Image (tube, grey):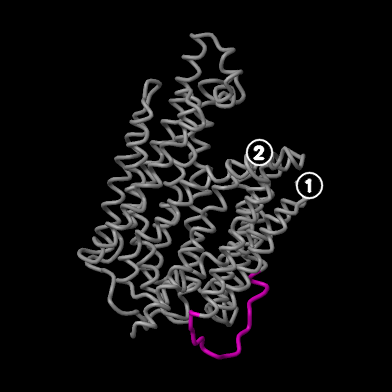
Amino acid sequence: MDSVEKRKQALVIVACMGVMFMTGVEGTITATAMPRVASALGGYALFGWTFAAYLLAQAVIIPIYGRLADLYGRKPMFFIGAGLFTLGSLLCGLAPNMLFLVFARVVQGLGAGGIMPVAQTIVGDVLTPAQRARLQGFFASMWALAAVIGPMLGALIVDKFTWPMIFWFNIPIAIIVTLLIAFLFRETPRRAEHKIDLFGAVLLVIAIGTFMLALMQADHLGSLLLPVLGISLISAVLFARQERRAPEPLLPFFLWKDHIIRTCNLGALAVGAASMGVSVFVPTYMQAVLGTSAYAAGTPLMFMSLGWPVAATLSGRLMLRASYRTSAILGAIVLMVGSGMLAMMGPETSTTFASVASFLTGIGLGFLNSPFFVACQDAASWNVRGIAIAFNAFNRMMGAALGTAFLGAAMNTSLARSLPAIADPVQYLVDPVRRALFSAAELTHVTGAVADALRLAFIVGIVIAAAGGIAGWALPKGLRPTNAHRDRPDVAA
C-alpha cells in the first residue's frame, strides 16, 4: 500500500472514530440538557420518552442495517443512516413541543442505529485484526471523550446558548464523516440479485421493540407488561420460523453455530450488563447514601470512562502477544475486583474510594470488551461481517438493558422488604429538601437500607463479571489477531 492509500485509509478510520464520538456524545450531551429542554417545551409526562424513543429505534434497526450492509454494501447503508441521523437532529432542534421531539428522536435513533455498526464494519474491512487490536485504545477513547465532555458541553450550551444547539452540534460532524466515507472508502460489493426478508424484518422489529419497551417501561406498563412480553415472545418465535424458511435470512442462524461468534455475542451481553453497575447505580449510591451533589456523583463515572480506553490500549497489545482469551479472563478478574470494591461501600465511603473502584471497573471492561469485539470482526468473512458486528453491538445494548432491569429489580426487591412504608426512598434521599425532613435516626435507617439494596445490585454485578470471564474462557486457547483478513470457509452467506 502506497503513502496515498495509507493516508486515505487513515482518514477513513478518522471518519469512523468521528462516528463513534458523535453517537457517544449524543447520549451524554442530552442527559444534562434535557430537563431544560422539557421545561422550555412543556410536557414533562413525555420526558422519559425522549430517551426511550431514541434507544428503542436504535435497538430495533441495528441488525437490519447490518444485514443490508452485507447484501448491498457498506456505503449505501451508511449514507441512509447518516441522512436519517442528520434529519432527526435537525428536527429535534426545531421541535415546537415534546411530542414532536419524541418523534424526531425516533428518526435520530433510526439513523444512529445504522451509522454505528456500519462504521465498525468498515473498520473491519479496511484494517486487519492485528491493526484493529492495536487501535482499540483510540476507538475506546472516543467513547471516553464523549462521556467526559458531553455532560459539561450540554450544560454549557443550555446556559450560554439556545437549547436546539445540543442537537445541532453533531450535524457538522455527520456531514464531514459522510463526505470522508463517500470519497475515500472504496468497496466492491458482490453484485447479485437479493430478496430482502421484509416479513422477517417486521417480526424482528416487533420482537425487539416490545421487549425493549417492557424492560424500559416496566414500572409504567402495569397490567400491560405481560401482554407486551407475550407479543415479544410470539414475534420472536415467528421470526425464528421465518428465518429458517427465507432464502436470504435477515439474521443467518449459522452465525450462532460458529463457536467464536456465538461466544463473542454472549460476552457482549455480559459487557453491556456489567457496565450498568457503575453507570446507573454508583451515582445513585453517591447521592442517596453519601448525600453528595450530582457533580460529585459524576466523578466515579469519569474515572470509569478514563479506565476503559487505557485498558483497551493495553488489551490490544496483550491480544497480539498472548490471545483473545487471556485479555478477556484478565478483564473479568479486574472487573470482579472493582465490583467487589463497590459492594464494600458503606455510608462512610469516600468519593476517592468509589472513584478507584469505578476506575478498576473501567479497566476490567476495557480488557473484557476488546477481545469479544475484535474476535467477532476477525471470525466473520466480508459477506456476513456487517450482520455479525451489528448483532454483537445489539447484544451489548441488550445486555445493558437487561443489566439495568435485573440490577434494578434486585435493588427494588431489597427495598420493598426493608422499607415497606416508603414507596420510593431513593427519591426522598436524592432531593435535599425531602432528605432534610428525616430525623437523624430515620436518615441512618433509610440510608442503611438503600446502601444494602445497592450492595446487592453490585454483588449481582460480580456474578455478571464472572459470566463474562466464562465466555472469555470459552474462546479458543491461543487464538489471537492475525495480520491478514480472515475469510473462513465455515462462515459464508
On the image, numbered disc 1 is attached to which residue? 97
- Distance from Cα at disc 1 to Cα at disc 2: 14 Å
Q: Quadrant of the N terminus?
A: bottom left
On the image, numbered disc 2 is attached to which residue? 35
Name the element at disc 2: helix
Crowd tier of the residue under label 1, counting other residues whose Cα lies within 10 Å: few below 14, some 14–19, many 20 or above: some
From the image, give the main secondary structure of the stretch colored magenta: loop
Q: Evaluate if marks 1 and 2 touch, with contact meaning CB atoms under 8 Å apart.
A: no
* Observer able to see residue 467: no
Disc 2 residue type (three-letter): Pro
How far across and down, in percent of the image, does residue 225 sit?
67, 44
Taking the magenta stretch, the answer to whether it contains residue 447 is no
How far across and down, in percent of the image, does residue 88 sit?
68, 60
Looking at marks 1 and 2 on the same chain, the residue that comes earlier in the sequence is marked by 2
Residue positioned most to the left: 321
Image: 321 above or below 26: below
Disc 1 residue type (three-letter): Asn
User: Which residues are the magenta region?
Assistant: 184-201
